Amino acid sequence: MTEKAAPGESPANILGVQGDWIALYGNPNTGKSSLFNRLTGLRQRIGNYPGVTVERKEGQAMIDGVATRIIDLPGTYSLAARSLDEEVASDVLSGDWAGGARPSVAVCVLDASHLSRQLLLTLQVAEFEIPQILVLNFSDEARQRKMIIDVDLLSERLGIPVVETVAATGEGIEELKNVISKAIDDGKKIPPTDWPEPLNHAVAFLQKEIQDRGLGELSDLTARRAIFDIDSIYLSKLDWRQEERVEIVARARDLARAAGVAPHVMEPICLRERVSQLLEGCVTQGEEQKRLTEKLDRVFLHPVFGSLTFLVVMFLLFQSVYSWAGPVMDAIEGATGWLQELLGAELVETPLVQSLVCDGVIAGVGSVVIFLPQILILYALIALLEDSGYLARPAYLMDRLFSWTGLSGKSFVPLLSSYACAIPGIMAARTIEDPKARLATNFVSPLMSCSARLPVYVLLIGAFIEPQFGAFWAGTALFALHFLGFIVALPLAFILNRFILRTAPMPFLLEFPPFRKPRFRDLFWRVYERGLKFLTNAGSVIFAISVIIWALLYFPRSSELEERLTKDYLTQAGVVSVSDLSEMSGEELDKRIQSAQVEQSWMGRTGKFIQPVFALAGFDWKISISILASFPAREVIISNLGIIYELGDDTDEESESLREQIQSERWKEGPKQGQPIYTLPTVLALLVFYALCLQCGATVAVMAKETSWKWAVSAFVLMTSLAWLGAVFVYQVGTAWGLS
Amino acid sequence: MIIFMPKSNLSQLRRGQESKIDSLDGEHGLSARLMMIGLHQGSDVRVIERVPVNGPIAVEADSLRLAVRHGDAAEIQVSDSND
């Protein structure tokens, strides 16, 4: 769950312990997370940085017998703070967060083969004047390509310890721990860069102007950043007017320009020069050896073959998710049913508690847990594709399809994950730099057809489309429903970006990491973290909502109604008391009572009240309350229909009798009396409604957490309206065409 | 003999074509980002693949492989290559 730190809360509280702590930072794809997993093992967890929705991974490593906190910062190329990730990394390393805690040591993780370009970030961090350690990871790959790095010389020149590691195998980890322990005591730092004189003049000018205007003090560091990045968020932290800022900074930049270099590229140019001096005679470049990556990319990056490969990969992915999860889901369902029966028998004396526990708590929470296998398998497979380096390729291929809407190739992974469940999808959107593009991605994520919609599709397609049109059209309908949300999402994102958010086009830079063998250890951690997060985040919300829905369907109870129904039934059956009824008739009576109780419950009354709204889509009051009751979690519609159609609530989508029951449902009154309720237009309308509607309390809650309640509620209202319009449209057009 | 060398930009390169980055200091956010990732003036670039209809361009520069959008690539001047 999110931890929100109050302003002024001490860093020690946020970190949970006093004392030394370590920050890991570096470029993406340097094996930083692998190294983190090696250092911390079981002792790790995910939280949030105070106030922002960037995931904070932290853990403990035993350093010299002392449990020491380690924070794994998001991978970044720069600390220019253009994305949330960069902002967080910069704030933590500079101590500009939660009370000003600075790490005792910052460990910079580099890919040894790309030492020269990744050292730019290291030198950027050197400006913060904190003790550092340089880790040359993937040093086995560097050795393979016969690249020789004089570690001692490099260490001497930088003034900090340098360690070679292979995080994947654990090589060098013990040495790293020893080095960290020593670095905490020694506190060796890289000296900050000597900036050209004109830049220093500009910095002094800017500081003086700010002070003269009574806007506060500006540190050398912040003043330099202000000159480097005109759109830097460091500036927005100061309390000044926009025009004032633009004017003063522009004048300071003009002074800096006297150095003969444009201010906005001065930093990388100076740092690069320093890196080449540092590495002079330190590194013998080996031979280029990335034949595998090059060969694979000939297919994966190709517009035609790459896209085909991607389609096949996706097909296999979803096939595996459905087929591997099936048996486990059945087992969970079995266990849920067994638990319901067991506790039901125990609580038979108190029907209210029995119903609350069995129909509310167990059914509600069970309906969430049942999706855990699918989500874990999907996560494992997506993590596998990501760790291998593959996912950057389809992101590149899909960018053209997304870019006209204002989304980018980076929206691809979040939207892909949303096909399993929108919650992990929304979380995955955190890697998108632009807050508006991230918001737009979050906004359309719930439109992707998640696995919870599948049971409804299976039930309705199996009952109406397959018998009438055959398996081919049933399969096509299923595919079309999975595609519908995506088709709606693109223009929606376009409208959102163009007219509401007015997103500025962001440069889209995507590195293609070399293909590497994913490590089971790292996959395991990602799946474990996600699974836990899903259970705690979604579980708590669903639990609460299940109880509420149960109460709305359960109350008020009318004992008078029960007596009347029992009397009628007994008269009909020609017996005197309930105990004379056969077991089957007894169950039949129970179902009738339950169904009648549901009809006059608060939810039932509401269903009848709002039915006219849904009548335009051909839905009767029973469908209407099923829809209402599945707003907290759409997967409960099957059990809702079960309760309502007098079947008791242990019905699943394969249940023949539920299928037969809805096939034979007829209008009891009104102009269509005697005709079947579920005609083809009604069924199609219902399918479209479920495909488009945001019936998931957990998603709305997570979305509110990641964006704001305003956006979450807007998404909910919009998707519900779209679903209703779509359903009415399909029903009216279908009826006019004379489909039946 | 004087050879006329028109300026071209990265988005104009064909698939497989090699060139050198000529200037990377246009006044937009892209330059500094590209330079921090590891590109710089004088980097050898090669177009690996392109997505049709002005889609992104996959390029290789030094030891780096990355995708740049068509519009962003148009901001990167390259010297006319001698292929």
Image (cartoon, coloured by chain):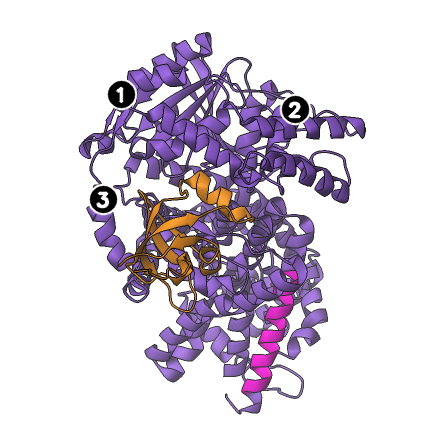
* Closer mark to the observer between disc 2 and disc 3: 2
Q: Chain of mark 3?
A: A
Q: Are discs 1 and 3 located on one and the same chain? A: yes
* Closer mark to the observer between disc 1 and disc 3: 1
Q: Which residues are magenta?
A: A716-734
Decide if residue A96 is on the left or right side of residue A208: left
Instruction: Identify the main secondary structure in magenta.
Output: helix
Above-or-below relation of A736 to A496 = below
CA distance for labels 2 and 1: 36 Å
Question: Reading the chain from its start, which is encountered first: label 2 or label 1?
Answer: 1
Residue A660: percent from the left, percent from the top? 44, 75
Q: Residue A219, which numbered label?
A: 2
Quadrant of the drawing holding the N terminus of chain A? top right
Q: Dots 2 and 3: beta carbons under 8 Å?
A: no
Question: Reading the chain from its start, which is encountered first: label 1 or label 3?
Answer: 1
Task: Find chain B in the image and tell me its colour.
Answer: orange
Q: Chain of mark 1?
A: A
Q: Which residue is mark 3?
A: A290
Decide if residue A38 is on the left or right side of residue A684: left
Q: Are discs 2 and 3 located on one and the same chain? A: yes
Q: Which residue is mark 1?
A: A150
